[in-house]
Amino acid sequence: MASALKTYGTLIGFVLVVLFFWIEIPDTFMTAKNWLNISQQVSMLAVVAFTMTIVMVMGDFDLSVGSMASLAGIVAALAFRDGHGVWVGVALALGVGLLGGLLNGVLVAYVGILPFVATLGTLTVYSGLAFLVSGGKTIFGRDIPTAFSGFARSGIPLADMVSLPSLTIVAAVVLLVVWFTLEQTTFGRRLYAIGGNKEAARLAGIRVRRLRFLAFGLSGLGAATAGLMYASRVASANPTQGSGLMLDAIAAVFLGMTMSEEGEPHVAATLIGVLILGVLGNGLTQMSIDSYVREVLIGSIIVLAVASSSLGKTKG
Amino acid sequence: MSLLSIQDLEKSFAGAKALGGACLDVRAGEVHALMGENGAGKSTLIKVLAGVVKPDTGSIAIDGAPVAIGSPADALRLGLRFIHQELSVVPHLSVAENIFLGRDYPRRWGVMIDWDGLNRRAAAVLAGLGVTHIPPGRKMARLSVGDQMLVKIATAFQDASVDGDAPARLYVMDEPTAALSAEESQRLFAVIRRLRAAGAGIIYVSHRLDEVMELADRLTVLRDGATVATRDIAGLQKLEVIELMIGRRFAEGYPPRLAPVSGEVALGVEHLSTGYLQDVSFEVHKGEILGLAGLEGAGQSEVIRAIVGADGGHDGAVSLAGRPVRIEEPVSAWAKGLAFLPRERRQEGLVSSASIAGNVSLPHLDDLVRFGLVLDRAAEAEQAVDLGRKVKLKSKGPKQKVRELSGGNQQKVVFARAIAGPPEVLLLDEPTRGVDVGARYDIHALLRELTAEGKAVVLASSDLPELVYMADRIIVFRDGRVATTVSTEGLDQARLAALCFGSPAAPSA
Ligand SMILES: Nc1ncnc2c1ncn2[C@@H]1O[C@H](COP(=O)(O)OP(=O)(O)OP(=O)(O)O)[C@@H](O)[C@H]1O
Ligand SMILES: [Mg+2]
């Protein structure tokens, strides 16, 4: 019993949350339209959480993802304002994300600063940069090309009135790429080994520093992608846009980790974590419940999930 | 009446039986050896006694009265003390704090911790074991594993009547000497004899038969989780014990050389120096086993680690098959055909959350890819199964987590990793630590096969007979320098021991 609760507690919790809203909001909650809507709402969080999973597999954290997402959105918007095309803006934003991530990687892997401290520092730096280059103002309106903002509104029509949102597709692609990387390649296998025992991994011929460096680069890239998605969705960019992402992303990975026997992060489990947060947000909003209540609930759920997963771990 | 009586313990882990009919009877004032192959269930039985593992069925009685041991605190209350096989220390606390963990620290004015008093008491506890070289204020993480083991032992031995625990009556030691040097072991034995004379019971687990025959009064043999025999040591032959353990006839000893050493140099080391090592030079030939001997920490491990680049830079030159190579990180050592088996399997060797296959394949992942980046899991599992069979690994299969294996079987996983490939030169630091006699023989036979194929082996070991019988030549280290090099032709263990201690009158060959 205890062991079932340990492994499936989070999944059971997810099902209960879904059942609750299904009963409370019978007309609109359990519809294809609402679920597609949820998928779009969580797509940005999903992308950040998926790439955050990569660094957390090694036992590291990236606290800078939220401010990196904001910075990437600003960079793209500034490029648009200066008359550059959509692809130039997107490429610049992704480049900034990759570089920012690699800078985290240098600090953590080569300089040897604890990830918590290093990325807390860069969190502030990237956030400050976003304010600096934007002048603290929101960039919106005609500065944002419709080809860019239209992307978040587009989708693949499925039936009348419902379509699969493009943002959802992006998140799904990132999910597949991260899953493939972590679960199917030797790169992923090495990351898990580093997470399990850094010293043993190094002595067994794994380039621990290089891999940590690269993984942080991927996390930065994911953050920038999410920033672009956000900017496209709201057709604007401001320097605090991404700030909510970091805590939710780490929470999603933690929720997922409770589902694995070893307490290892796996990206498929992170997806469940993201969905729990997304469904809660969607359902509570539909029930017009105060957003502070949502925060209290989400916090409690995380604590509960982690507590239930450590049940029985103290004894063999 | 017996001090401790265990009847018909059974314990399964997810369907796999670890104990099935284990019985054990220990008297006050005896050293009782618990013997068995790797995975026989010794540590599991001990964990049951310690309240760490819950048995499925079975009964435990102390002084004839049945007891229930539901937690480590229960065991402590009953007067049981444990030294577990796998070290559990708090690395960022000091030695003294580790010794007094969970007990009341001495205080000053009722509130402040009296650190000096704490350290003094810890030093006294250590001195009781004849240990004076470990400063009680030092962080645990900075000690060698051997020293950490000494601290754990001291912790178990400290006067137990503090805090109202029952006085210690039974000491349980699971391979305490596996990480100790010969002198440290002797000191431990002296303490054990003292405890025995004072009327305590001692359960003692070790794969070193010689020390068991020397120390124990009786022994109980476990095979596949069941007790097969309890005997008096007096009048018992070593070979009988081995045959009880493995359940078949066994010729004790070492496998013979299969081929002569070639003249070609496989690995050359010239003027190697690090912070500790001073100007170490030697050559290993193809087909040769070069032994590294010396007292604990005299430089054997350091040489191996320096060659594979485990500790960063060093002065001096290393060459492979005559070609100079630069190795600054272990990754390039593996890539150049050097295999490295580190001394501490749990800290340095294994990713215990990963599977057997995942641990064996770790340095060889590049040979196990399809389409440039996809891990070929089938080939990986096949490699693990294949090598697992060679080293007599006892497991449920290549996917089993290493964490679930017995100590000796974990060691076999590290060894399997080192011979996968296969490499040209093997650098092995205590490769048979914690491995049972039967599997040890198989590992030695594998080394003979590898050298017959022209591989070169560097073998650091604190097990002197292993060096004398397996190596062709032995380098003796003293304080980070090569003291002497001897051929094993006509060498006996006593002379090698004298060389390690630095006694004069030992001519070099
Ligand atoms: N937590 C666990 N989960 C699954 N199997 C386990 C677990 N702990 C032990 N086992 C299994 O129980 C068996 C007995 O293991 P145990 O550690 O008691 O052996 P041992 O006699 O101490 O061996 P060694 O000499 O190698 O230390 C082994 O087959 C081992 O794989
Ligand atoms: Mg054991």
Image: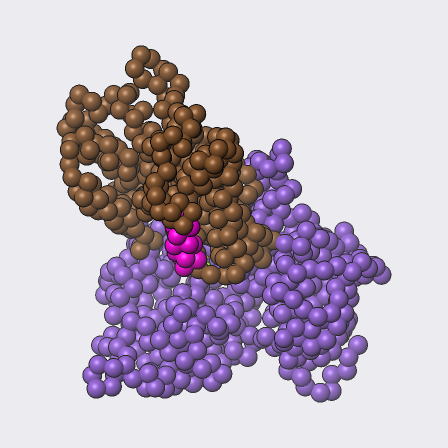
Chain colours: A brown, B purple
Tell me the quarter of the picture where residue B273 sits.
bottom right
Does the segment drawn in magenta span residue A191?
no
The residue lying toward the viewer, choosing from A90 and A303, is A90
Query: Going 37% across and 38% down the picture, which residue do you hit?
Result: A139
Going 55% across and 54% down the picture, which residue do you hit? A209
Looking at this view, is B88 or B236 the one in front? B88
Is B335 situated left or right of B321 in this image? Answer: left
Residue B229 seen from this side: no
Q: Nearer the viewer, residue A238 or B69?
A: A238
Measured as percent of width and height from the top left, residue B403 is found at 45, 52
Task: Kindly identify the residue that appears in the image at 28 percent across and 38 percent down.
Answer: A277
Q: Where is B404 relative to B398, above or below?
A: below
Residue A144 at what x, y percent from top left?
40, 31
Q: Quadrant of residue B66?
A: bottom left
Going 21% across and 86% down the picture, which residue do you hit? B109
Q: A91 above or below A203?
A: above
Q: Is residue B303 above or below residue A57?
A: below
Q: Quadrant of the C terminus of chain B?
A: bottom right
The stretch of residues the image draws in magenta is A116-130
Horizontal and vertical percent for residue B387?
A: 61, 46
- Magenta: main secondary structure equals helix
* Residue B485 in view, yes or no: yes
